Amino acid sequence: VGQTPQNEQASVLGVFLERGELINGYPSYTKAGDDDAMLWHAGQSWFVGSAANLGQDRGWVSLRDGCVRPESSTVTWKVWDAAWVVAPELRCLAGDALAAEIAKAAPQIALVGPTPQNKQASVLGVFLERGELINGYPSYTKAGDDDAMLWHAGQSWFVGSAANLGQDRGWVSLRDGCVRPESSTVTWKVWDAAWVVAPELRCLAGDALAAEIAKAAPQIAL
């Protein structure tokens, strides 16, 4: 969890599940909801990389430490961007620390702001936390619309139909492995025959959401 420089490799971060198989004598992990992304140790480092490279000393994210458990390390993680770049805000959490991070999930969040040509504007709005983890992440239902939900799958957050809950598909997406969507600095996208960047779309929670709601005018007219 945590931001990386210029959000490099943000999409491959997130929750990882222990595989029950030692690789090079170390535990190994699969990303929740994305079987292609794994975490393993090889050579002198831990790597997050493609399942096709499992056990090799290569990947998208690395930790140069021989520790048996990556969450115990105090070494700084790095991300690949044509060269290894230090990511001082990136942390590996487990146990109580991970539970505490997930517990920070806001009870109410909102997707606000215009989208290009108002695409998917109708599925934006206020979302309520469901109290159920999907692929290891918090999930949400749109207030007043049980058919619209927000969840994480694969490498992204999605707003989509309840019928597709937990799948890597939807109408609105955020390509980031962050545990809480409101913490991301990655730009949201909306679907319009292809994914279209929506630079003005934001995810608000807590005080930021309260401040947005407080802007409601005392009187309006149509």
Image (spheres, rainbow, N blue to C red):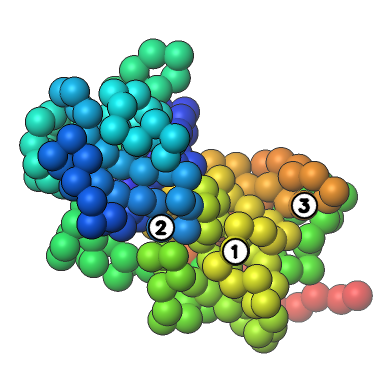
As shown in the figure, which amino acid type bears the numbered disc 2? Answer: Ala
Q: Name the residue under label 1.
A: 167
Name the residue carrying label 3.
Answer: 191
Q: How far apart are marks 1 and 2 (CA)?
A: 12 Å
Q: In this view, does 120 lie to the left or right of 214?
A: right
User: Mark 1 or 2 closer to N-term?
Assistant: 2
Disc 2 versus disc 3: nearer the observer: 2
- Tell me, for residue 88, which label it has, or none: none
Q: Position of residue 63 (x, y in %)?
A: 22, 30
Q: What residue type is labelled 1?
A: Gln
Please tell me which residue is depicted at 22% across the width and 28% down the height of the picture.
42
Measured as percent of width and height from the top left, residue 88 is found at: 25, 31
Q: How crowded is mark 2: few (under 14 residues within 10 Å), some or many (20 or more)?
A: many
**Above-or-below relation of 156 to 151:** above
> SS of the residue at dot 2?
loop
Tags 3 and 1 touching, CB below 8 Å: no
Q: What element carries label 3?
A: strand
* Quadrant, the C terminus: bottom right
Secondary-structure class at tag 1: loop
Mark sitting earlier along the chain (3/1): 1
Residue type at mark 3 is Trp
Give x and y (percent) for residue 35.
Answer: 46, 51
At 47% from the left and 77% from the top, the residue drawn is 129
Is tag 2's residue or tag 3's residue first in the polypeptide sequence?
A: 2
Residue 93 shows in this picture: yes
Mark 2 — residue?
32
Q: Residue at x 23, y 65 (%)?
A: 100
Residue at image coords 31%, 27% = 56
Q: Where is residue 22 in the image (x, y as percent from the top left)?
A: 19, 46
Residue 79 visible in the shown view: no
Q: Quadrant of residue 32?
A: bottom left
- Is the residue marked by circle 3 packed among few (<14), some (14-19), or many (20+) residues within 10 Å? some
